[in-house]
Image (cartoon, coloured by chain):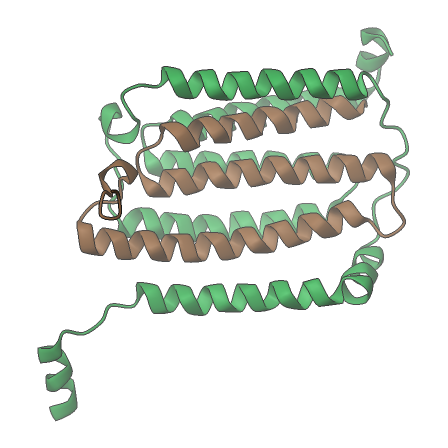
Chain colours: A brown, B green
Amino acid sequence: MILNQFLILAALLFCMGVYGLLVRRNAVMVLLSVELMLAAVNINLVALEAFWQTAEALGQILAVFIITIAAAEVGIGLAIILLIFRNRRSANVDELNLMRW
Amino acid sequence: MGFEDWAAEPLNWVFLAVALATTISGLRVVTSPNVVHAALFLVAALAGTAAIFLLLAAEFLAWVLVLVYIGAVIVLFLFGIMITRAPTGRDEAEVDHQRRAPAVLVSAGLFALLAWGLLSQWGDTALDRITAGTPTEVLAEGLLGRFVFPFEVVGFVLLAALVGGITIARRDLSPAEERERESR
């Protein structure tokens, strides 16, 4: 195995997430794309950890933190989307112009 | 390392199959017109990620990913989809923006940039120092030793996010409803 096969797979997943982030209208779908990007970052961290083989498995510890933060982000993000949907009858990001100048 | 050497390693073929499945499901996550399908394809993409973790000898993290993401986060997403009545039909214009070309350009450009950087930095550096799986003990010593403070902070962040989520998503009663509840 070479290191780059993992890193390039992660880059590919990340760029797909970027595409979804830009092209999706529904806020739930935007969050799904963000999850894809976070998974790509985790692959990167674990691959580089396998390469450096640090004594404390630092890359994997950082990945644990990312997974935790991602779970918190999904919880609060969906709560906000739910509230917006309840007030505006829509969860499309291009229709939310309330705070747009 | 030439391609013949690379192809001679059986693990690389496992990687290739997993990577292909992950890429295809990732592509379906961002292109599927049906939101529920997109969420279910995210399950497949994350399962592929967990398999990659297993290939990289990170067993604990792989099962954490399965447990937290596939077990909990996707369920949360499905609830969100059901509650907000996200589009589940075939009307593609509803789900995506009309103009996709700029997004394709941005993501393809970003991928080209990243791939160029990675290839010029790492080339075909071998990843051959994996001997055995990472013992969970090492992770535990790190999390509860050197990184105990960030660990506690992250736990607090998670708690605060969940309490905040409940507070935000709770429906406030109207004044009439509140009076009715008090009189009861």
Q: Nearer the viewer, residue B5 or B152?
A: B152
Q: Is residue B52 above or below residue B137?
A: above
Residue B149 is situated, as x and y percent measured from the top left of the image, at 72, 67
Q: Farthest residue toward the bottom?
A: B183
Q: Nearer the viewer, residue B183 or B54?
A: B183
Q: Is residue B105 left or right of residue B157?
A: left
Quarter of the image with the C terminus of chain B is: bottom left
Q: How many marks on residues? A: 0
Quarter of the image with the N terminus of chain B is: top right
Q: Quadrant of residue A3?
A: top right
Q: Is residue B56 left or right of residue A10?
A: right
Residue A74 is situated, as x and y percent measured from the top left of the image, at 46, 52
Q: Is residue B102 left or right of residue A43?
A: left
Q: Residue at x 53, y 16 (%)?
A: B109
Q: Residue at x 31, y 38 (%)?
A: A26
Q: Residue at x 63, y 66 (%)?
A: B153
Q: Is residue B70 above or below residue B92?
A: below
Residue A79 can be seen in this image: yes
Q: Farthest residue toward the front?
A: A101
Residue B184 can be seen in this image: no
Q: Is residue B13 above or below residue B139?
A: above
Residue A48 is situated, as x and y percent measured from the top left of the image, at 78, 35
Q: Quadrant of residue B167?
A: bottom left
Residue B146 is situated, as x and y percent measured from the top left of the image, at 82, 63
Q: Nearer the viewer, residue B29 or A23?
A: A23
